[in-house]
């Protein structure tokens, strides 16, 4: 079973994906971390973030140790990620590793922006997780504060909205729900309620599948 989870920044995809992965015993890939690693590598090397040729080369030769870098989850790495993620060469370089991961026996859970539309259009279940920009900015603000990064709420809200706008407007694999995605608005849901709702959707899909087979 392949479960694709997409949605805008800080909608709660990662937390939900980890819970789903543990519950169903499926391996989990945070695909945003790959783009963050490319963005971070570009920043660390002092490269120009608009240099597509270099960014694509960095993505092809991605140093996986960067996935453990303490700054991977920083606001700067997120910003750099969304810049390099708009580049066709970067997306192409990261596509196979994501598809290979999804192809594991038994399936996998992947979260990102284009899993249900581009990486795994054949996914068994597609969830599109959203929340209001204010709620997402609040969550990101709390997350950054826990990491010891002080930032004003208004700045975070502006960053979240700018990142969404860039992710939606880009020509390559823009952020949008797949036609067959289940929308899950977590604005008023805590993680337990969101997880319950996701399990209900996955369970309903299973029942429909066994009904069809029977
Ligand atoms: O999910 P996360 O905030 O870590 O993603 C960082 C950035 O990586 C996103 O803003 C987006 O531009 C990019 N991304 C993407 N496609 C994915 C996952 C992430 O374009 N599948």
Image: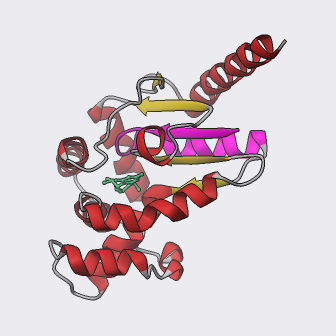
Residue found at the very far front of the displayed protein:
213
**Could one spot residue 57 in this view of the protein?**
yes
Residue found at the very far bottom of the displayed protein:
45
Residue positioned 50% across, 38% down in the render = 121
Which image quadrant for residue 97? Answer: bottom right
The percent coordinates of residue 156 (x first, y second) are: 24, 50
The percent coordinates of residue 85 (x first, y second) are: 29, 60
- Horizontal side of 195 relative to 25 (left or right) equals left
Nearest the viewer among 39 and 106 is 106
Residue positioned 18% across, 51% down in the render = 155
| Total numbered badges shown on the rendered structure | 0
- Horizontal side of 115 relative to 48 (left or right) equals right
Residue positioned 85% across, 12% down in the render = 214
Q: Looking at the image, is 92 positioned above or below residue 25?
A: below
The percent coordinates of residue 158 (x first, y second) are: 17, 46
Which image quadrant for residue 45? Answer: bottom left
* Magenta-colored stretch includes residue 107: no
Which image quadrant for residue 133? Answer: top left
Quadrant of ligand 1 in image: bottom left
Nearest the viewer among 110 and 152 is 110
**Could one spot residue 73 in this view of the protein?**
no
Nearest the viewer among 27 and 149 is 27
Residues in magenta?
Answer: 1-24
* Magenta-colored stretch includes residue 15: yes
- Horizontal side of 12 relative to 44 (left or right) equals right
Quarter of the figure with the N terminus = top right
């Amino acid at each position: 079973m392949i479960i694709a989870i997409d949605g805008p920044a800080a909608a709660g995809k990662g937390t939900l994906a980890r819970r789903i992965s543990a519950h169903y015993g499926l391996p989990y890939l945070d695909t945003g971390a790959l783009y963050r690693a490319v963005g971070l590598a570009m920043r660390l090397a002092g490269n120009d973030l608009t240099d597509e040729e270099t960014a694509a080369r960095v993505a092809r030769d991605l140093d996986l140790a960067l996935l453990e870098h303490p700054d991977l989850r920083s606001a700067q790495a997120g910003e750099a990620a969304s810049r390099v993620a708009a580049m066709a060469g970067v997306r192409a370089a990261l596509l196979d590793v994501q598809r290979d991961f999804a192809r594991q026996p038994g399936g996998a859970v992947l979260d990102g922006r284009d899993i249900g539309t581009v990486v795994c259009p054949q996914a068994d279940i597609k969830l599109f997780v959203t929340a209001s920009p204010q709620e997402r900015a609040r969550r990101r603000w709390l997350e950054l504060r826990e990491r010891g990064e002080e930032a004003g709420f208004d700045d975070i809200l502006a960053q979240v909205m700018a990142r969404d706008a860039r992710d939606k407007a880009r020509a390559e694999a823009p952020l949008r729900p797949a036609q067959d995605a289940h929308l899950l608005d977590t604005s008023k849901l805590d993680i337990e309620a969101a997880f319950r709702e996701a399990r209900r959707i996955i369970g309903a899909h299973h029942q429909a599948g066994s009904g069809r087979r029977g």
